[in-house]
Amino acid sequence: MSHAIARRRLAVLAALPLLPHAARAQGSAQGSAQGSAQGIAPGSQPDGPVTIIVPYTAGTGPDILARLASPYLQPRLGQPVVVDNRAGASGLIGTQAVARAAPDGRTLMMQPNTFVMNASLFPTVPYDPVKGFTPIALLTRGELALVVNPDVPARDARAFADLAKRRPGEIDYASPGNGTPQHLGMALFSLKAGVEMTHIPYRGSAPAIQDLLGKRVAAMVLPVHTALPLVQAGQIRMLAVASEARSPSAPEVPTLAEAGFGGAQADLWYGLLGPAGMPEPMVRALNAALNAWATEPATAEALKAQGMIPSPATPEAFGALVERDYRRWAEVIREAKITAG
């Protein structure tokens, strides 16, 4: 493998969690789709080939999830299911294409929660994240953690906040870029802790992590599964996780809420949506099929190995999550004066 490819894989892994076991899980999903569960009931199926648009490049988390799920859906829908990467403009191009598509189930999209964040980061976006789409299925969640390099004299999130208060603006933190979940997660922590830190945006996660390890920046928010090997190697210290509960992968690490920073929850999630106005029977049938797929042993194993937690939910619960996150991150972006640039 070339050094360029290796660097690209590291960047993708940290920014949008990848699933290296994808081939094995996809093969299992294909076999299961061909040999087990019943198809979607007649009348709930699209009447032609289905395209799952991924508004990001190949190899990102949404892309791999779409490619894992499509072989499972195809025999159940009785139609070809293809994945179409329409990257560009931070996901706006592909997302707009789905917003404008007919609500017949033939055009869907796989999205991370960045699409609700983008709606507040840019002056204008060509879609409404709440009214412009039909939430179908929440597939997975990923946990984030607050980490520091070993030279930072703080052993927990409270001590880190106290350090930042004593040195306003002097503590710097890295992120893969303005408006990324990692950036917004740290911005939210800063607001809740009442501290001022300096954001250093990078062009992707790989250089940001390299400078964290090189002790050129003090802190970062990272996916738990990306942070753990670095913690075990003694290269960084994990102060807290930003999830509601402690991470099963690092149960000894407290949550930010336990450290006294309630409301600082931040995580990653991925889900499938379609254009607004899709027929309810079709939505419920797709939701049931995807919930079954996400909790199959082989799928769940591959997802959990990369810190992605299968998260089956009803369309209504997923829609409520989209609306809640849209409003919550809009407030953070406004208060922290963050822009996509």
Image: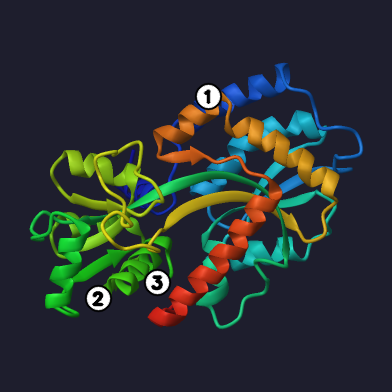
- For badge 2, the amino acid type reads Val
* Image point (56%, 71%), residue name: 327
Determine whether, in the image, residue 214 is placed left or right of residue 264: left
Q: Quadrant of the C terminus?
A: bottom left
- Looking at the rendered structure, the secondary structure element under dot 2 is loop
N-term mark: 2 or 1: 2
The residue furthest right is 43
Asked whether the viewer can see residue 62, the reply is yes
Which SS class for mark 3? loop
Name the residue carrying label 3: 178
Above-or-below relation of 325 to 18: below
Q: Are marks 2 and 1 in contact (CB under 8 Å)?
A: no
Amino acid at pointer 1: Ala
Amino acid marked by disc 3: Asn
Left/right placement of residue 190 relative to residue 268 reads left
The residue positioned 68% from the left and 30% from the top of the image is: 72
Q: Nearer the viewer, residue 182 or 6?
A: 182
10 Å neighbourhood of mark 3: few (<14), some, or many (≥20)? some
Provide the residue designation for mark 2. 195
Q: Nearer the viewer, mark 3 or mark 2?
A: 2
Residue extending farthest to the top is 35
**Can the viewer see residue 88 in this picture?**
no
Q: Which residue is mark 1?
A: 298
Q: Residues within 10 Å of mark 2 (few under 14, many from 20)?
A: many
Q: Nearer the viewer, mark 2 or mark 1?
A: 2
Q: CA distance from mark 3 to mark 1?
A: 35 Å
Q: Which badge, 3 or 1, comes first in the chain's sequence?
A: 3
Whether residues under marks 3 and 1 lie with C-beta atoms below 8 angstroms apart, the answer is no
Instruction: Assess disc 1: are there few (<14), some (14-19) or many (≥20) residues with their C-alpha within 10 Å of its C-alpha.
Output: some
